[in-house]
Image: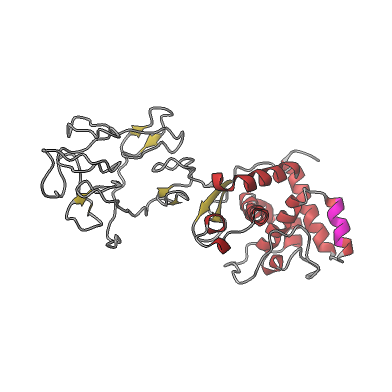
Amino acid sequence: MAARSRKRREYPRPELRCPGCQREVQRFWSHCPDCGRALQWRDDGTTGAECYRCGWVVSDSFSYCPWCGADIQDEASSAEPLKAPKGFKYHARCDWGCGGGVMYPMGHCPWCGRPQTWRYDEFDGVCPHCDRGVDDWMDVCPWCGGDATGQDLIRRAMTRVRRLLLVSRIKDWGYRVLLRPGVSGVDPRFPKVVEIERRYVIGKRRRDEIPWQMLVGLLVHELGHSFLYHHWSWTRAGRFRRTFGEVREAYRGVEDIWVDFQRRGVATTHPDYVSAYAATHAQEDFAETFRIYVVRRGRLRELFAEFGRKRKGVVVYEKFLVLHDFVRRLRGWT
């Protein structure tokens, strides 16, 4: 298959809206990204032809429906592949070299019927189900109709995390978990968006996937970063700075340290930190403290007893008290 690096798309902004929820949509999206309603793009009088199977607009010159791939060849079909018949634009040549032109976002070549690929540079990420472009705000993939966030693939872990946050009395700050390729993390510019490396869930190699208990720990750890970024003004408080240190120091991450997010107890090493990873930076210190606090359901008496057995420093006690008091304050408790 020929490389498609040259294929780019236009991103028009017409006033098209979902007939169900009235969310603005783009032409030739298969589903509304808000309510999930299946969309159908019929002929508006431009071409005078529609596919017999899917009902979408086609050209009389086509041999195949570019949307569903159905064979629609008849006596009106062009004997030679055309560049851009009436009603359609030319964006690139067919991936397979048949000589015909294709328009974004056709899924099939209208001349040879073979599948086409596109770049989705202007989207925030890709759908974990179909690998086509989606934005972070989308609940439904506009192309395949699947869960654009990927939370349906980690439903058990997400249920556990929400339950842990609830019993820990942590008020929902509007976080949004997304499965995306790359690395797990939170961008400080978008503190509510928590990205989880999708190969941990749908890895091409079985060994890439992690147990759901570890996934729960990873989720809570990254939510700790999101919680901190969302309440960033709190980091200026004197008590926070004395306890956790300066979280504003430059930090590029530490990728060569193995972190056992499945572990619920605190480490015996590093008397001033709950884990070895927490000692790498003040932000990781908070995220690990947050993780232990949540997975242990905010039970300070039980935690402090463990700190005593493992001879943790006074500062570790203070870290959990700072977090506990802030959580109570957010809920309006004294």
Q: In this view, does 23 lie to the left or right of 227?
A: left
Q: In this view, does 202 lie to the left or right of 84?
A: right
Q: Where is residue 264 in the image (x, y as percent from the top left)?
A: 76, 57
The outermost residue toward the top is 20
Q: Where is residue 218 in the image (x, y as percent from the top left)?
A: 64, 56
Q: Position of residue 110 (x, y in %)?
A: 22, 46
Quarter occupied by residue 63: top left
Majority secondary structure of magenta residues: helix
Relative vertical location of residue 46 with respect to residue 326 in this rendering, above or below? above
The image quadrant where one finds the C terminus is top right
| Label total for image | 0
Chosen colour scheme: secondary structure
Relative vertical location of residue 57 with respect to residue 92 in this rendering, above or below? above
Q: Is residue 185 left or right of residue 264?
A: left
**Depth check: 216 or 210 in front?**
210
Quarter occupied by residue 23: top left
Relative vertical location of residue 114 with respect to residue 23 in this rendering, above or below? below
Q: Where is residue 131 in the image (x, y as percent from the top left)?
A: 42, 52
Which residue lies at the image location 78% right of the left edge and 70% below the top edge? 270
**Depth check: 16 or 61 in front?**
61
Which residue lies at the image location 73% right of the left edge and 39% below the top edge? 331
The image quadrant where one finds the N terminus is bottom left
Q: Does the magenta stretch include residue 255?
A: no
Quarter occupied by residue 279: bottom right
Which residue lies at the image location 86% right of the left edge and 56% below the top edge? 304
Q: Magenta region: which residues? A: 301-307
Q: In this view, does 313 lie to the left or right of 48?
A: right
Which residue lies at the image location 30% right of the left edge and 41% below the top edge? 68
